[in-house]
């Protein structure tokens, strides 16, 4: 089986219990630990963003996750029906690394995803928001 779909609730608790299921699916498909870690971190960051930003921390909303392994890549699609992203620029960190007392407390999730994944794409159509991430192996 190289394709799977999950439906989860918009809660941080649901995300933390969901992560091992994805790891297991990737392990069963002989994906290396390094790739699994990159996918897991990226997926958790993206799901946290959906809960926080698209659904404004409100539980009881649907998040659909599709994961597909095709030849040499893993394709992840997260779908939600919350508030659409308005800033579609690629994330970048803007801070002074020598000033550790003033490091940003948030806003690094998208930057981390961009560093770990090989391709990302976001679009919104008729109330459905889709965030696609691709990792080559």
Image (cartoon, rainbow, N blue to C red):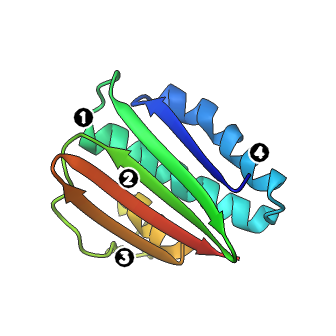
Q: How far apart are marks 3 and 1 (CA)?
A: 30 Å
In 3D space, how far apart are the residues under numbered discs 4 and 3 (Cα atoms)? Answer: 39 Å
Residue that lies at the very extreme toward the front in this rendered image? 1
Q: Furthest-top residue in view?
A: 60
- Callout 4 touching callout 3 (CB < 8 Å): no
Residue labelled with disc 1: 56
- Circle 4: is it few (<14), some (14-19), or many (20+) Cα within 10 Å? few
Between circles 3 and 1, the one closer to the viewer is: 1
Q: How far apart are marks 2 and 1 (CA)?
A: 18 Å
- The mark closer to the camera, 2 or 3, is 2
Q: Name the residue under label 2.
A: 105
Report x, y in % for residue 20: 70, 39
Q: Say which of 33 and 121 sits in front.
A: 121
- Pinpoint residue 90: horizontal percent, then vertical percent: 31, 76
> Disc 4 marks which residue?
24
Mark 4 or mark 2, whichever is nearer to me? 4
Q: Badges 4 and 2: C-beta atoms under 8 Å apart? A: no
User: What residue appears at the point 29 percent right and 26 percent down from the top-left corner?
Assistant: 58
């Amino acid at each position: 089986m190289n394709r799977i779909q999950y439906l989860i609730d918009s809660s941080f608790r649901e995300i933390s219990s969901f992560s091992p299921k994805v790891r297991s699916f990737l392990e069963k498909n002989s994906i290396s630990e390094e790739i699994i870690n990159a996918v897991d971190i990226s997926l958790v960051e993206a799901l946290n963003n959906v809960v926080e930003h698209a659904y404004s921390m409100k539980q009881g909303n649907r998040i659909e996750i599709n994961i597909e392994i095709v030849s040499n890549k893993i394709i992840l699609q997260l779908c939600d029906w919350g508030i659409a992203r308005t800033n579609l620029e690629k994330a970048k960190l803007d801070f002074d690394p020598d000033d550790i007392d003033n490091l940003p407390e948030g806003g690094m999730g998208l930057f981390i995803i961009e560093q770990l994944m090989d391709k990302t794409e976001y679009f919104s159509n008729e109330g459905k928001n889709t965030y696609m991430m691709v990792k080559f192996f």
